[in-house]
Amino acid sequence: MLGSEEDHLNAVIEINSGAGGTESQDWAYMLMRMYLMWAEKKGYTVREVELSEGETAGIKSVTLEVQGEFAFGYLKGENGVHRLVRISPFDANARRHTSFASVYVYPLIDETIDILISPADIEWETFRSGGKGGQNVNKVETAVRLYHKPSGIVIKNQESRSQLQNKDKAMHMLKSQLYEREMRRKMETIATIESGKKKIEWGSQIRNYVMHPYKLVKDLRTDFETSDVQGVMNGDLDTFIKNYLMQFGSGTK
C-alpha cells in the first residue's frame, strides 16, 4: 500500500477555508488541529511554514510541513474538500451551518529528485511577516511570495527570519508541487487506462463531518464511517487512512 517511490517522503499540507467567512475559517482551524494531533500520535514533527489568521476566529489558510517516515504515503488520501455540518457557535439563533475547507497534500522532494526551473519563470515579492501584532511581527520584509508563471503556482513562506532561507524553502516547495503535478498526471493516466477501477477525484469533496442532528464522519470514496466524531477531530484518522490505502494505494504507483 506504500510502495510508490514518493510515499516515504515528508509531506506538505495546505488547508484553505472555503466561502462563508468565520464559519469556514473556524472549520479550517479545526482541520489543522486534527492533523496536528494525528501527527503527534504518529511521532511526526510538524513545522508551520505559513499561516493566515481569520479576522474573527480560525484561519484563512495554513501550510504545514510534516516530517516523518512515510508521511506523504499516509496523508496523500486527504486531498480534497472536507465538509462540516454543525450548530454554529457563532450563530446567536443556534442554526445549523455547513462549512467547507480544502486540503492539499504533496510530497516534499529530496535531493534524489532533480527539477529544473528557469529563473525567467519566477517572480518574487517580499513582505513583512507576523501575526496580528506584538513582538512576533517583523519590521523588515523577510517573508516571501513566489509566483511561477508557467504553472500559476504561488508559494508563500514566512517560516524563517532570513529572507534568503525563506526563498530557498519556497523554491523547494515549488519543485515539490511541480513534481506532485506530474505524479498526479501519471496517476490520472493510469486511472483512465484501468477504467474498471474507481477513479480518484482530486479536489472533490471526499469526507463529511456531521455533528448535528446526528454524529457521523463518512468518507465518500471508501464508504467507511464512524460515529466517533470527537475521536476523529482529536486525530484518530488511521482507520480512514488505512481504508483509503487498501482501496487506492496500489493505484497511485
Image (cartoon, grey):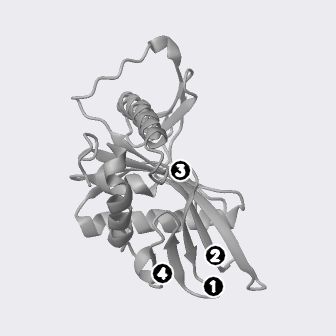
Element carrying mark 2: strand
Find disc 1 in the rendering and name its residue: 212
What is the spatial separation of the Cα atoms under label 3 and label 1, in whole angstroms?
27 Å
Taking the spot 25% from the left edge, 65% from the top edge, the residue there is: 42
Q: Which residue is labeled 4 in the image? A: 229
* Residue type, mark 1 in image: His
**First along the sequence among labels 4 and 2:** 2
Of the residues shown, which amino acid type is indicated by label 4? Val
Cα gap from disc 3 to disc 4, whole angstroms: 24 Å
Front position in the image: 117 or 137: 117
Amino acid beneath label 3: Glu
At 38% from the left and 55% from the top, the residue drawn is 248
What amino acid type is highlighted by mark number 2? Answer: Val
The circle drawn on residue 85 is: 2
Residue hosting label 3: 201
Ranked by sequence position, the earlier of labels 1 and 2 is 2
